[in-house]
């Protein structure tokens, strides 16, 4: 992965100097703030709360706003990673630099992952607010954020691959959304299929089940293996695609 660090720095600069990351950050925090507020209002009206009905579990495990954010923010972060460079022709200069294809892909991916991580950091304020009103189970908080980062890391890897497959940012965005939505629909199959292989597969890839489990403090190693596979496989294919540009 020679040259990954310079590519990472270059990509981070291009993300945060342009309005893209800032616009996404504002929109993302607005949506999450709206979600958090609605959940707190709802939970405060309940006579009693448990780990299954508390605001932390509801925010990470039951909020449709969180899923919509993942389905839209990840494609928006990755759509320009390769597509814009191929369209503008700057990818040629990058490919002739002393950096390997794996270094290019790793540097760009880590930049989007860092940005994604930075976008979630302000949401820790929500937990601090809740701490002032009651006791917080930090193990549940930790597993919930682990779920968010695991799902997001996989979606960002898929988006990186889609961006490498086209010169159009819009096409890359749409393709990433379609793949993510396909995985989401497949996961819903756990509520549709009868007990058997199809239901087991759907349950295994279900982001709804993953976030519901992790928002209760349940960390299933199979979920983490799937997230890791969803990161590794698309990035491996992306490296092969980038390497093909040098020879074609």
Image (cartoon, rainbow, N blue to C red):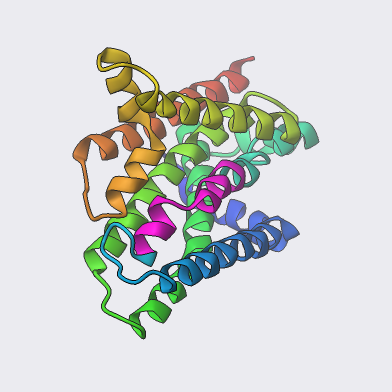
Q: Is residue 66 magenta?
A: yes
Q: Main secondary structure of the magenta part?
A: helix
- Residue 130 image position (x, y, % from top left): 38, 77
* Position of 248 relative to 129 (above/below): above
- Residue 217 image position (x, y, % from top left): 23, 55
Q: Is residue 44 magenta?
A: no
Left/right placement of residue 88 relative to residue 189 reads right
Quadrant assignment for the N terminus:
top left
- Residue 71 image position (x, y, % from top left): 56, 41
Dividing the picture into quadrants, the one containing residue 141 is bottom left
Left/right placement of residue 143 relative to residue 184 reads left
Residue at the extreme bottom of the image, as rendered: 132
Q: Residue at x 51, y 46 (%)?
A: 67
Residue range corresponding to the magenta coloring = 56-73
Whether residue 213 is visible: yes
Q: Residue at x 53, y 39 (%)?
A: 98
């Amino acid at each position: 992965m020679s040259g990954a660090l310079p590519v990472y720095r270059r990509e981070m600069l291009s993300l945060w100097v342009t309005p893209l990351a800032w616009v996404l950050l504002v929109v993302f925090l607005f949506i999450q703030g709206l979600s958090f507020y609605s959940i707190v209002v709802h939970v405060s009206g309940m006579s009693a709360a448990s780990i299954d009905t508390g605001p932390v579990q509801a925010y990470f495990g039951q909020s449709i706003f969180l899923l919509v954010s993942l389905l839209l923010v990840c494609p928006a972060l990755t759509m320009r990673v390769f597509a814009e460079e191929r369209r503008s022709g700057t990818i040629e200069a990058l490919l002739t630099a002393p950096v390997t294809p794996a270094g290019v892909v790793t540097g760009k991916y880590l930049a989007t992952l860092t940005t994604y991580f930075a976008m979630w950091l302000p949401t820790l304020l929500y937990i601090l607010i809740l701490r002032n009103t009651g006791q917080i189970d930090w193990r549940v908080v930790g597993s919930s954020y682990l779920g968010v980062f695991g799902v997001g890391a996989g979606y960002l890897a898929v988006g990186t691959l889609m961006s490498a497959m086209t010169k159009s940012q819009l096409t890359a965005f749409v393709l990433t959304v379609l793949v993510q939505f396909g995985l989401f629909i497949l996961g819903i199959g756990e509520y549709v299929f009868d007990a058997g292989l199809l239901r087991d597969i759907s349950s295994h890839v279900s982001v709804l089940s993953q976030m519901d489990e992790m928002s209760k403090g349940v960390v299933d190693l199979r979920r983490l293996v799937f997230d890791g596979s969803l990161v590794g496989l698309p990035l491996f294919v992306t490296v092969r695609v980038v390497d093909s540009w040098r020879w074609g």
